[in-house]
Image (cartoon, rainbow, N blue to C red):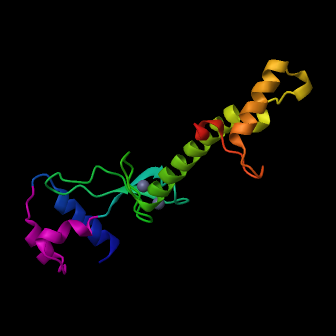
């Protein structure tokens, strides 16, 4: 079908007066399609927005049918991404997983920055009072194994 013929078909299909039924149009243009599938021949609406994942691929909408039905959702014809907050295409799932991973990493970094041993200043024994030295000695004896190879956290020995 030539472009002119196709435009003529569209004009007659979308004619608000609907002078011809879809079956008549199919017959007039010798189309190899059943009436209920006619809408698949309609050209998609190309939007100005591009896909966030595919370079230079414009989002589309399904064409409006004669009855006024049409996809309101914009989608990418290349990767299947849908322009909705709940899109679960592989790209969106990967992006969400990456965001989760970053958030967990940020939380881990925060914990490390608060509790990292490197941040603690360990006083010299000579700087401790006699009282604290005795305490340190008691804790050490309490926590360390007989052969001095293993030291458990104080809480684990309770
Ligand atoms: Zn895409
Ligand atoms: Zn998506």
The vertical placement of 134 against 97, above or below, is: above
Most foreground residue, 145 or 87: 145
136 relative to 96 in the view: left or right: right
Q: Is residue 24 magenta?
A: yes
Most foreground residue, 61 or 19: 61
Give the residue drawn at x 18%, y 53%.
69
Instruction: Residue at the far front: name it.
Output: 146
Q: Give x and y (percent) for residue 139.
A: 72, 33
Q: Quadrant of residue 110?
A: top right
Q: Give x and y (percent) for residue 84.
A: 36, 47
Instruction: Residue at the far right: name it.
Output: 126
**Picture quarter with the N terminus:** bottom left
Q: What stretch of residues is rendered in magenta?
A: 18-42
Give the residue drawn at x 13%, y 52%.
16
Q: Is residue 25 magenta?
A: yes
Q: Quadrant of residue 81?
A: bottom left
Give the residue drawn at x 69%, y 40%.
143
Q: Give x and y (percent) for residue 22.
A: 11, 67
Q: Give x and y (percent) for residue 75.
A: 38, 56
Give the residue drawn at x 40%, y 64%.
77
The vertical placement of 148 against 3, above or below, is: above
151 relative to 19 in the view: left or right: right
**Picture quarter with the C terminus:** top right
Counting every numbered tag in the picture gives 0
Most foreground residue, 137 or 30: 137
């Amino acid at each position: 079908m030539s472009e002119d013929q196709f435009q003529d078909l569209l004009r007659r299909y979308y004619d608000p007066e609907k002078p011809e039924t879809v079956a008549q149009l199919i017959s007039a243009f010798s189309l190899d399609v059943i009436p209920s599938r006619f809408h698949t021949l309609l050209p998609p609406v190309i939007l100005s927005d591009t896909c966030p994942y595919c370079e230079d691929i414009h989002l589309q909408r399904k064409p409006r049918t004669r009855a006024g039905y049409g996809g309101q959702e914009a989608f990418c014809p290349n990767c299947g991404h849908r322009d909705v907050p709940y899109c679960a295409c592989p790209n969106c799932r990967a992006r969400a997983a990456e965001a989760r991973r970053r958030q967990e990493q940020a939380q881990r970094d925060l914990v490390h920055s608060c509790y990292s041993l490197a941040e603690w200043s360990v006083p010299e024994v000579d700087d401790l009072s006699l009282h604290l030295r005795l305490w340190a000695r008691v804790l050490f004896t309490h926590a360390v194994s007989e052969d001095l190879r293993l030291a458990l956290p104080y809480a684990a020995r309770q």
